[in-house]
Image (cartoon, helix red, strand yellow):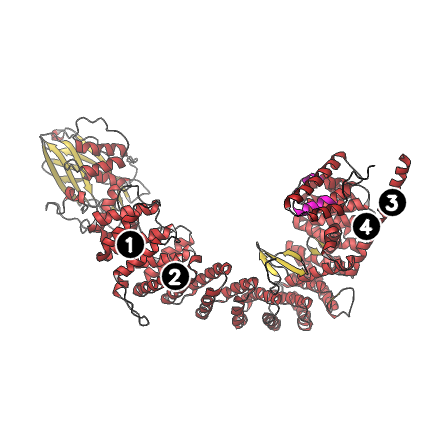
Amino acid sequence: MILSRGPKLCNFVEWRGYKVVYKRYASLYFCMCIDQDDNELEVLEIIHHFVEILDRYFGSVCELDLIFNFHKAYYILDEILIAGELQESSKKTVARLIAAQDSLVEQAKEQASTISNMIAQATK
Amino acid sequence: MNPFSSGTRLRDMIRAIRACKTAAEERAVVRKECAAIRAAISENDQDYRHRNLAKLMFIHMLGYPTHFGQMECLKLIASPGFPEKRIGYLGLMLLLDERQEVLMLVTNSIKQDLSHTNQYIVGLALCALGNICSAEMARDLAPEVERLLQFRDPNIRKKAALCSIRIVKKVPDLAENFINPAASLLKEKHHGVLLTGIQLCTDLCNISAEALEYFRKKCTDGLVKVLKDVANSPYAPEYDVSGIADPFLHIKLLKLLRVLGQGDADASDSMNDILAQVATKTESNKNAGNAILYECVSTIMTIEENGGLRVLAVNILGRFLSSRDNNIRYVALNMLMKAIALDSQAVQRHRATILECVKDSDASIRKRALELVYLLVNESNVKSLTKELIDYLEISDPEFKGDLTAKICSIVEKFSPEKIWYIDQMLKVLPKAGNYVKDEVWHALIVVITNASDLHGYIVRSLYRELQTAGEQETLVRVAVWCIGEYGEMLVGNAGMLNQEDPITVTESDAVDVIETAIKCHSLDLATRAMCLMALLKLSSRFPSCSQRINDTIIHYKESLVLELQQRAIEFNYIIEKHQNIRSALVERMPVLDEATYSGRRAGSVPAAVSTSQGAPLNLPNGVAKPTAAPLVDLLDLSSDEVSAPSSSGGDFLHDLFGVDLPPASSQPGGNHAQKSGTDVLLDLLSIGTPLAQSTSMADMLSSGDENKSPADILDKLGSPSGPPSQASPPVGSSSMMDLLDGFGPVSSVPENNGPTYPSLVAFESSSLRVTFNFSKQPGNPQTTYVEAQFVNKSPNAYSNFVFQAAVPKFLQLHLDPASSNTLPASGNGSITQKLRLKNSQHGKKSLVMRIRIGYKINDKDVLEEGQVNNFPRDL
């Protein structure tokens, strides 16, 4: 339904009693489904907010980044929205939080690899 | 540890899937991966669990079933490491939803995680909870979340706030617990927490009236101040979006203020200044600014009346409406719909622009604009608006046509100032979009047409013209065919010309041509062609010169493979050929359909069977070769009169029975005669029709004397299936009658005589016979009278084959039970009793009256006695 729309048309479509707001970035479409009484323009801003953070994180994000790192994209989304509501309007804070969590993951991985090394050596 | 045991890495799997060229290849790859994952799960593989879950999530996103992985999520969540928990919670949110029972098992893990020392893990748990918790989980974990609302770390606080939103939505009772913590969140400095706190408050106000009161009293001023600060804040790079500081916060604040100000004058007053400031100072060349303005206008429209602000708001909307950006226009149209309720004058000013939007190339905008136009219509502008809409109808897209047609039709119906305008508009719509017009619309049109009797000529001529050009529009054809059938002679005779019409010459055969074309056209559906047949029948009566030609056409359809057409063709053919004398009465002009009744019925959504009788054709009488019930119903008009067996007959086989002039002895009772051929037709029909009462009295009428076999046969078929009962020695005629009467049986036995009593009456007395009537009525049913008739033989000879018949005027309904016997002993040594039931639809206005005829055989000689009973008690 959205793919069939031309370029100059408005970014809102009505669907099954809800509204779908979409924004196109090159070949990617980002869609959000909202209730009838939500502010559509605000939602456009939220989508842009998300995309900008992704951009900052991945560094010039492209489609492949999202495909191969979908789980990371989800983590970022979880820092921006919970239950559909906006959580944080500052891109810097979000970036900081994600960085902190990523470093935790790195730490854990390092620990695990040293332990497994130890075990591997022990069981040889 | 076999490094290859987990199969591929996530990246490789994704690459493999993307490399597939066909769907079958992809399915094969996915199947292989799933098998590997399943094997790993059953081995309880620890090390690669998170990788497997990641793969599973990708497969899920592609659309394949992945329920076997749900328990893996739980195990990952329960493991101590952060990366495992992270991916476990993500899996939980993606693969499960709140309806799954597996979710309950997670509750404990989440509870522990909510008290974890690592704040990121707490964050993960809150996030998962906020996204998919069910009502039971919410109840269990609400106290934890409440506690976390006051945690030292702002990130946790904001997550807890949003989690609380979901909790109170799932379990509204818990709302009270959150009011106080939420209020304290409003005093925060951290934007994130402030944002989420505001959202929490907004939802609390929507759910709980108590919360609304609390926030209104305590927090309104504080919020106004915060908004002021944000609006006036200097450039802050962290929150800046296209030149505006934190537009999200602006919008959320405005939303909350809207909820607080709605319905409360004080709160609204305190907001006026800041709203004015925001409305005037915000820049509107960027989307962020427009979003804020939109929210601001929405708030102004909702809170209590303030003239100046309203004007401001409407101006902003006007500006939006003429903006080139489609998004802005869409949003403006949306807002205007709400504005109409408040200030419709202001919106009327923009009518022209809105009309332009109806023709826009953007489907969403068109839709919004059309709904707005519909709300704008009133008596003064209906004509111009409708004209515009109809003009656009011609060029609009097919998907849009349906909506547009429905709206036009309903506008026209509601607001039409005079009938001729209504009909004109519909005449324009039908050729352009007839296929989209719904049934009830054209039914209503027909009702209006029948009521506009002076316009009939004009209507039928216009329809004829339109039909020439647009013969595929289904509804147009139906309406046109019906009108031509009804008012054919006006078409040909150019009757009732209006000033602005040009005369056209239409010959009878032209009219018939048109209908024949329609009936041959295969793109039209069954109901339309059935209507064409009906119209042809009507025309065969109105245009006698074409009758033969019409008959030929109808004969052609007697072999049609479609049951409906075949049946109609056979029946109409029968009428044309055999029943010339009643045909004209059959297809007489229909009575004016009552609009009030029709709209009442329509509102009650009862399929108005009668007013759509021209088409709706499916209740044809059981297969006896007799004309359809439809014209019968027409003639009877909407209030179905109880038709009882009238006395005089006209139908062929009934002629013989009663004769046209009765012996002078019986005076003509009022209302019984003057039965035109119309009612004769009824007789015909009723003799074969199903109503039981009539048939029994008909059976009476088909008395012994006249051996008219065919009706008796037909009645035999119709009547009871019971075989010939054992009767003493009945002659043939009465046996058939007796069969029927036996079969019908005592349909209603006389009830207990506990109603008001009436004196018995000697209904008829002659030198040889006395008839006495005894009356009873059931209480609560004043219209129905039960009569027991007693016959006494005054002569010295016994009577055999004794038959009693009765006839009543139209407003009465008569039902006869079988007699106790048909031999009357002589000299009053015994009597025959027979029960009758009379229903008086004019009870209280007219009293009962009856004509009776008694036939019997005395000494092998047939005797017939007749009389009239006028002396019924008045109040029966």
Mark sitting earlier along the chain (2/1): 2
Mark 2 in CB contact with mark 3 (< 8 angstroms): no
**Residue at mark 4: chain:** B
**Residue at mark 1: chain:** B
Task: State which mark lies toward you, 2 or 4.
Answer: 2
Is the residue marked by circle 3 packed among few (<14), some (14-19), or many (20+) residues within 10 Å? Answer: few
Mark 1–mark 3 Cα distance, whole angstroms, equals 94 Å
Is the residue marked by circle 4 packed among few (<14), some (14-19), or many (20+) residues within 10 Å? Answer: some
Is the residue marked by circle 2 packed among few (<14), some (14-19), or many (20+) residues within 10 Å? Answer: some
Could you tell me residue B536's position as x and y percent? 28, 54
Q: Mark 3 is on which residue type?
A: Gln
| Residue under pointer 1 | B536
| Residue under pointer 4 | B119
Residue A108 lies, with reference to residue B194, above or below; the image says above
Q: Mark 2 is on which residue type?
A: Ala
Task: State which mark lies toward you, 1 or 3.
Answer: 1
Q: Secondary structure at mark 1?
A: helix
Task: State which mark lies toward you, 2 or 1.
Answer: 2
Q: Is residue B279 visible?
A: yes
Left or right of residue B46, residue B259 in this image: left
Q: Mark 4 is on which residue type?
A: Gln
Task: Specify start and end residues of the magenta stretch as a single range.
Answer: B54-70
Asked where in the image residue B333 lies, by quadrant, the reply is: bottom right
Q: Mark 1 is on which residue type?
A: Leu
Q: Nearer the viewer, residue B812 or B416?
A: B416
Mark 2 in CB contact with mark 1 (< 8 angstroms): no
